[in-house]
Amino acid sequence: MSQGTITVGMGPVRRDEVVAVARHDAKVELAPDALTALAATRSRIEALAASDQPVYGVSTGFGALATRHIPVERRADLQRSLIRSHAAGTGPEVEREVVRAMMLLRLSTLATGRTGVRPVVAETYAALLNAGITPIVHEYGSLGCSGDLAPLAHCALAVMGEGFVRDAAGERRPTAEALAEAGIEPVTFAEKEGLALINGTDGMLGQLILAAHDLARLLLTADIAAAMSVEALLGTPRVFAADLQALRPQPGQAIGARVITAMLDGSGIAASHADNADHEYPIVQDAYSLRCAPQVSGAARDTLNHCCWVADNELASAIDNPVVTLDGRVESNGNFHGAPVAYALDFLAIPVADVASMSERRTDRLLDVKRSHGLPPFLAGDPGVDSGHMILQYSQAGIVSELKRLATPASVDSIPSSAMQEDHVSMGWAGARKLRRALDGLTRVLAGELVSAARALDLREPDPAPATAAVRDRIRQVVDGPGPDRFLAPELEAVVALVHDGSLIAAAESVTGPLA
């Protein structure tokens, strides 16, 4: 579904605009100031190309071949050969949204006027995005320095009219055929243009932005799930009080505690055991997975905020090598190194694993008759005959174990390339790919907790809080309540979809108002 038109100018695009183009097919247009800047810096490149002065990427080869002077009549061949040779990705296709984000971010850098390409190059990128034509990019090929070379080269290859793309309907087609049908003329790259299209961190940055968008939703969902489990396990809401949280003024923690408090407001279950001394199951202190939920989700939020700051700085960057400076110099630089983005991607994989680990521990408590304070073993209808949610927790445990492996940083690795010219690389693309897998795992673990917590609330008396009841009732629209064992996998997938699209947050906020 299209979300209007995004204007790409000399300034940065916003993270929400990247999401709109990548996921919702928002149209793009180039601002007049960007077209003026493109034309102005292109004249500088053309002047250098006509001189005897060797300029990297304009009149020389690339990387370890930079000592080779290229005569004027071979320079179009130089750019074309660069893109063809660098479009060497392999493995499965990368997701459409990732490729669209990458193309928008490269277009945004072109629009700064610091790369020296002609306006037609930027206009063709915009045309491909608006036509829904997506170059086929492969999983492997980027080392995150000099930028995301292979993925970006596959995009540039499509601008040349070569290789393969997916059209707006998702059909794999030869690029030349898809461009002709859309009325888009392929571009023959002039001096420096091929190089300008591949020396960027756009692939890893696009994935960081999409991941940050998703993780913000998942952390709010984690707090909602925690509230439901706290309630179902007869935990106390008192530990989430604002004055207690203020003793440790971490901003993310305060948000998590406010969410859980709002979710538990008006809970009949919590009121029924407020005086533990008179309750059948007196509890002195709740387990850490309940009591410390906002501390963990809050630390994750604060890490996410730092990574969004990194992403915003990167969005304001003009990354290319060489780059045309504001005073007209053409200078080599190292800004294509992906370390800032790579670290952020690795940072996020750590709290993703930890939030999932805490969620799995709460689920396990819901299923363990010795710790669930009166719930049936495994929440089964007829324990012994029925296994209930026993294997649901096995699936969670398998995912959490995988998430711990995915939390191992990619950015600490480096394999030299280009005959030792590129002797230290960021591996940021690899960090981005594993983070996407990790977010899918967190989504599935949270869905498992929500399924179990909803069933546990059904088995409790009196009534749960209005907000937790609203979430449970939304789950009940796709998953039946307690009873004999059923085919569980489709029910889990149905709740995964509700987590993914934000439906459960919407259900909660229909009672509480905006939670975060």
Image: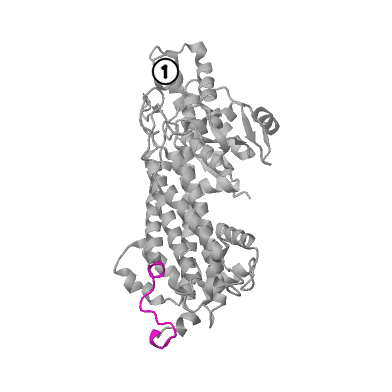
Q: Amino acid at mark 1?
A: Leu
The quarter holding residue 301 reads: bottom left
Residue behind mark 1: 65
- Nearest the viewer among 295 and 135 is 295
In the displayed structure, does residue 139 sit left or right of residue 51? right
Q: Residue at x 55, y 23 (%)?
A: 84
In the displayed structure, does residue 31 sit left or right of residue 163? left
Q: Inspect this view and state whether residue 12 appears.
A: no
Q: Is residue 508 above or below residue 47?
A: below
**In which quadrant is the C terminus drawn?**
bottom left
Q: Percent position (x, y) of residue 281?
A: 43, 82
Local SS, label 1 = helix
Which region of the structure is painted magenta?
276-291
Q: Is residue 170 above or below residue 47?
A: below
Whether residue 96 is in magenta: the answer is: no
Q: Percent position (x, y) of residue 61?
A: 44, 18
Q: Residue at x 42, y 37 (%)?
A: 427
- Nearest the viewer among 84 and 290 is 290
Q: Percent position (x, y) of residue 225?
A: 49, 66
